[in-house]
Structure formats: C-alpha cells, structure tokens
Amino acid sequence: MNTIVRLLVMLLLAAPALAQDQAPPAETPRPGERLRKVFAERLRQELQLTDAQAAEVVPKIEAIERIRREGRREKAVSARELRTALRVGAPDAEIDKILARVDASEVERESEVRARMKEVDAALSSRQRAELRFFVAKFRREVDRRIRGEAGPMRQRERMPMRRPVAPAPEAP
C-alpha cells in the first residue's frame, strides 16, 4: 500500500514536468486558409512568379475574390428580398428600389474588381496576364468539383462500376 501511494505522489509531481516537454497540438488551418495557400502556391508555379511578383499579386487577387464572394452574398440577400416583395405584393416603387440597389452594387463591385485587376496586370508580363485568366477559371472549376464531391476524371472512373461487355446479337441465318 505504501508503495502505491509513493508511485501516485511521484506521478502527480512528475505530470506537470512531463506535460511541459510535450509540444502543443498543431493547429489545423481552416479550410479557407488552406485553400488560399494552395491557390497562392499553384499561382506561383503556373505563372512562374518571382517572389516580388507573388508578394504584390497574390493579396490583390485574394482581394478580388473577396469582393466577388461579398457580391454573391449581397446578390443572394437581394434575391430573397425581391422574392419576398413579389410574394407579398409590394408596390412597384419598393421593387424598383431593391433593383436599383442591386444594380448599383454590381456596378460598384465590377468597377472595384477592374481597378484591382489593372493593378495585378501592371505587375505581370503579357504571357502571365493571359495565363492568369485561364488559371483562375481552372482553379475555380477544380474547387467547385471538389466541393460537389467529384474528384476528377481518374477518380470518377475509379468510382464507376465496371460494365460487362455486351455480347453481339446473334446473326440471323
């Protein structure tokens, strides 16, 4: 019994020291952060950006994407407002006000996106500017596919069941 008590006391005294030696658990980055890192790294590789170009361009492209995301959210809110206004039989003046706000917001957002793209374009060569347009569209499609659960051509084929070959119809005598 005395030995057990001694062991327990030693464990209690040693526990804080043992805990200090352990590294803190690594924080897992949020999906959005991981996606931004993957985007930035792939952008560097695909466009062969220098460090200086990447430092200038990546934050601006991320800002453009943020503006577009906010625009999609605003558009969804406005669409709900319009549906509600139509459903309750709101007067045309109220509907016009919502539509005017949607239109003004879209114009402002597109103007902001164009201004940021001009800044991005100024930091890139002509070839990099062209490749950027294709890269962004391709990256978005890839992310959308992954979100929907579609992996890609190879994985899609792996998930599809194999079809048995159909025997040809017998020839008529």
Image: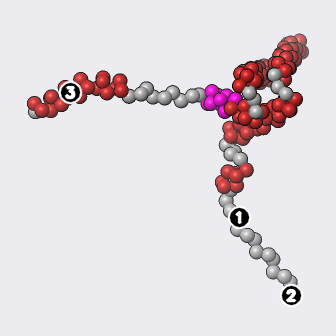
Q: Name the residue under label 1.
A: 163
In the rendered image, residue 71, in percent from the top left (x then y), is placed at 78, 21
* Dot 1: element: loop
Q: Is residue 56 above or below residue 31?
A: above
What secondary structure is the magenta-colored segment mainly? helix
Give yes or no for residue 123 being in the magenta stretch. Answer: no
Quadrant assignment, res 87: top right
Earlier in the chain: of badge 2 and badge 3, it is 3
Range shown magenta: 31-40
* Dot 2: element: loop
Q: Is residue 3 left or right of residue 151?
A: left
In the rendered image, residue 19, in percent from the top left (x then y), is placed at 34, 26
Quadrant assignment, res 102: top right
Earlier in the chain: of badge 1 and badge 2, it is 1
Q: In this view, does 59 lie above or below 142?
A: above
Q: Looking at the image, do the residues carrying marks 2 and 3 touch, with CB atoms under 8 Å apart? A: no
Along the viewing direction, whichever of 57 and 152 lies nearer the viewer: 57
Look at 73% across and 39% down and name the residue there.
Answer: 142
